[in-house]
Image (cartoon, coloured by chain):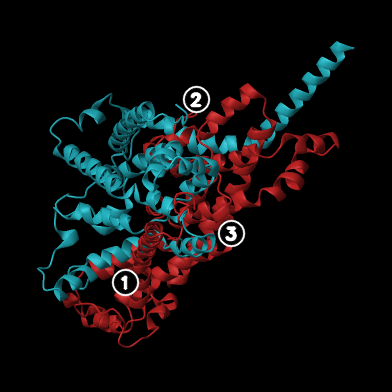
Chain colours: A cyan, B red
Amino acid sequence: MKKIKVSKQRKQLKSTTRQCLIIAAPSLIAQFIFGWLPFCAAFIVGFQKFYLFKPCVFVGLNNFKSFFYHNPMTLIIFRNTFYYAFLSIALTFIIPIIIAILLMEMKKSVIRVMMLLWFIPVASMAGIIIWKYFYNVNYGLFNGILASLGLPLLRWLNDPHLAMLCLVLPGLVMYGPGLIYIASLQSIPEELYEAAELEGAKFWQKVWHITLPRLRPIIAMMMLLAIIGKLQIFNEPYVMTGGGPSYATYTVVMHIFSTAFQSMQFGKATALSLILFVIIMILIIIQRRYFKENIDV
Amino acid sequence: MPLIAKVGKKGFRVRSLVIGISVILWLGIALHLFPVWWMFTTSIKSARETFVFPPSFWPKETTFVAYKLFFTLGSIVWEQLNYPVYVYFKNSCIITFGTMIIQIPITALGAYSISKLSPPRLGRFLFLFLIGTMMIPAEAALIPKFLLVKHFPFPTMSIPKVPFANTSFPTYDFVNSYWAVILPGIYSAFNFILFKGFFDGIPDELINAARLDGASEMGIFRRIVLPVSKPVFAVVAYFTFSSVWNSFMWPLIVLKKNNLWPMSLMLYWFQTFIMERPPQGYSPEVQHLLQSGIGFSGLMAMSIIESIPVFIMFIIFREQLMTGIRLRGFK
């Protein structure tokens, strides 16, 4: 009797497993072909040299070496990329968090109106272009303001020392109060704040001792995603400056792009992208080790 | 309003705190909306006024002539953009809605299967398989991905030979077709996490009860899971829409023919045309075009048109976006 039951259960389990695989099949196949296959192939392509009219050949580590020996561009692109990532995370990462915390203090009806206004979206290319127009030396808004104040005009995107800062500044304004922060703020139990208030905690003490520790796992995750994203910056410099002036905003991914699709050196470009990949992975490991996701430690 | 003290609500300190916070927030909103407002006022300025320095805050004469470019630009500009703008708008729509229609069902079914049907150990493996690529930066696989759509299904530079024959394997070239943009987006690990987080919250009893009644797994998904998971579908639909609509680098790589370009690429070429040449250098023909509306006003008008669909999608999914987000960490 028992045996029959067990075998029936097993049969049931087997059929659910089959069902599971059938239903998941499209996503598994798609993930295999467009997710894992290109990633694994990168480790082959990175060690090859591309020829247009004959089969490509393995060249060992030559692609990687070419970035380390007598190549001043390597230093430039990595310096620019890290500078951009540092600058934009230092200046803009914290703003959506502050806004989300402050927003929760408003009345429900005010929150609705504010969020509606905050989320009036601009397509990303349109956002880049309006800022490029602001920075325009001859007809832009910023030089217009400087001129009407009687200050000396700046060259903004054409100034090598200012160009990178100009790429970061839009981030101070073009953001929303992170929906993810708001969602996790709402999940903090109200009793914690009430208890703190009974103990006589002030505004900042509540933020510091209750809100921020509860937000920490989300902040850690968003920081991780921000680092990954910022190190791969492409659109803003490509559209606003094209890498100039004198390579002041030329980033790693822009170099990958032009190596691959303008000079047709696919092997070299893949090698460079693998170098960036390794750097990002090291940063992720460091970040995960030192910013634990557990709240209640 | 948990942070502001409830005791002494009428007190001066608490009052000034509330006022201070709302001033900061309204200031932030004003700064946030300023570029949009500037875009709009510039788009209704006459072409000549956009070349006045310093720029005026409100147009002296308003004209909507720049929006006419939606039907005529391209045919009158220059070789890079010889199609009217609505063609690029249509391309954006095809690519974006094509990706949404294919991606959302595939990802949702995958997430449902891992969340509710899989045995523990296999499920764990499949879960890692399905989200693993999210932690890998996209550029790492950029070139093999291009090679993959160039000669599908081989992501390598040269195509392998058929054994014992002197020919290569047959391949298919997706470059210069909408599929080159749609296919790499048919599954999304990020949306998978959103779906799975939501499906995990649906009680198992509900599904087991339906299973005892003899419903098929697809039937359960359609009749029980779908009706309760509208919020997560809305969130995913909005995220997918805005990410594909805003994509720039990938279309730049795989779409070489200019009749296939989406709006973002068209705007890119349009702005290089407007911004990278000083107007003094324009020939008489181009001066004439500038007067007919091309110029910064035209550029801003096209930017507004590119932003409108994002705004419409936001209005449609507003309710769910504001309440329905539930993202679980990586567990």
Q: From the top left corner, tell me how far across and down residue B59 is, in percent.
A: 31, 83
For mark 2, give the secondary structure.
loop
Q: Position of residue A259 (x, y in %)?
A: 27, 43
Q: Where does label 3 land, which residue? A: B319
Say which quadrant the N terminus of chain A sits in.
Answer: top right
Crowd class of label 2 (few under 14; some 14 to 19; many from 20; radius 10 Å)? few
Identify the residue at the far left of this view: A152
Identify the residue at image location x=44%, y=44%: B150
Identify the residue position indicated by label 2 in the image. B163
| Amino acid type at mark 3 | Glu
- Residue drawn where x is 12% and y is 33% of the image: A70
| Precedes in sequence: disc 2 or disc 3 | 2
Chain on which label 1 sits: B
| Callout 2 amino acid | Pro
Q: Residue at x 17, y 49 (%)?
A: A247
- Amino acid type, residue under disc 1 in the picture: Trp
Residue marked by disc 1 = B78
Task: Tell me residue A121's x, y (percent).
Answer: 44, 62
Residue B320 seen anywhere in this rendered image of the structure: yes
Task: Give the Cα distance between marks 1 and 2.
Answer: 50 Å
